[in-house]
Image: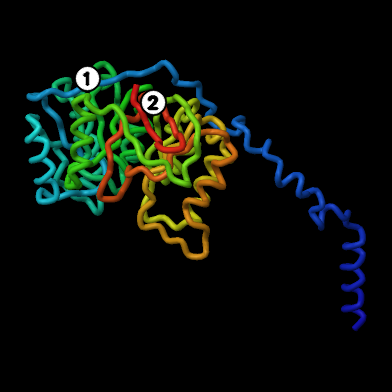
Amino acid sequence: MRKKLFLLLCVAAALASCKKEYITNEYITNEYITNESVYTSKYYISNPDSVVGVDIRPDYLKKGDTVAVFAPSNAVTKDELSKGISVLKSWGLNVVEADNLYMQNGRHAGELSDRLEGMQKLLDNPNIRAIIAARGGYGATHLTPYLDWTKFERSPKWLVGFSDITVLHAVLNNKGIETIHGAMVNNMVNSSSVETLRKALFGELTSHSIQTNSDCIKGKATGRLVGGNLSIIYSLGGTVNDLNVRDAILLIEDTGEANYSIDRMMYNLKQSGKLDCVKGVVIGEFTNASQGKDDPINEIMRDHLEDLGIPVLYGINIGHDSENLATYLGREVELVVDAKKATITYK
C-alpha cells in the first residue's frame, strides 16, 4: 500500500512540474493552421529555374520514316501489339522493335539490363524518328539512373506514351525537350486517340477544346504543358527527376486510386510549393477511382485549386479511359477558359 501511494505521489509531482504548453499544444492555434504562408514556393525542394524559352522540338514525322516500339515497363505479347503496329504501318511508317520487346521477367519486359539495353539502342539510333511505348505498368523509373541521353539530345526524336511513361516525360521535359502524351501500341483502338496521335506525330495537332463545365475555373494563361500521371509525379517528388513545373501549365490524370489518395497527392503538390509555381492546370480523367467516404474528385480538385487565381480546365479526355487524346508535353500552350469553351492551343 505504501509503495503504491509513493508511486502516485511521484507521478503527481512529475505532472505538476511539467510546463503546460508541453502537454496541451496550445501553440497550435487556428491562426497557425490557416496560415497559407506555409505553402509558399520556397518549400519546393529542388527550387528549379524556369525552363521558359527552352523548346527543343523533334522533327515531325513524314511517310517513310522509321519509328520504334520500346518496352521499359510491363511485359507484352505479340498479340497485344499486332493491331497497334499495323496502325503505325498504315501511316506509311517503318516499324522496328526493341530487342527486349517480347521478353518477360516477372511483370517486366525482361531483366533491367535487357530493358536498359533495348531502350538505349533506340535512343542512340539517329535513323529512328520516334519511340513509342508498347505499354505502361511499372518499371520505367528503374532505367532513369542508367540511361545516357547524350546522342538523343544531339538528334532528338519523339517519345510517346502515358501512365508509367510519365517518368520519361519528366526527364525530357525537364531538359526542355518536347514529348507526346498519348496512346501506346497496346491500346491503339480508339479512333480519336489514334487520330490525335497521328496528328501530333505529323505536326497537324493545333488545339483541344471542351465545353466549359461547372468544375472549370475561368481564366487565361500561357506556359509549358507538363505532367501526366499524378501518382508518378508524386513519386518523383524530391528526386533528381522531380518534375519542373515552374511557370508551367500542369496536366494531371490517374486511374485506380482511392479518392483520399488523390487528395493526399494534391496536398503534396500544395505543400511542396508546386501549385504556387504553376500558371494553370489541366485535369484529365480519373478512372476507376474508389470514393468510399471521401469527397468526390471534382470537389477535391476545387478545394486545392480554386483559391490560386489560375485557370483550370477540368474533364478533358486525356488519361486511362478508352479515349485518350494525344497532347504535346514540354510545349508552350495557351490555356483559355471562358464561359463557353475551355481550350488548349499549342504554340
Query: Is the residue marked by circle 1 packed among few (<14), some (14-19), or many (20+) residues within 10 Å?
Result: some
Give the side of residue 326 with respect to residue 30, left or right.
left
Image quarter of the N terminus:
bottom right
**Secondary structure under badge 2?**
strand
Front residue of 173/316: it is 316
Front residue of 204/259: it is 204
Image quarter of the C terminus:
top left
Q: Position of residue 250 (x, y in %)?
A: 44, 34
**Secondary structure under badge 1?**
loop
Q: Which mark is residue 333?
A: 2
Q: Position of residue 191 (x, y in %)?
A: 18, 43
Q: Position of residue 46 (x, y in %)?
A: 52, 29
Query: To which quarter of the image does residue 227 belong?
Result: top left
Give the side of residue 45 with respect to residue 128, left or right.
right
Query: Is the residue marked by circle 2 packed among few (<14), some (14-19), or many (20+) residues within 10 Å?
Result: many
Q: Earlier in the sequence, mark 2 or mark 1?
A: 1
Q: Which mark is residue 59?
A: 1
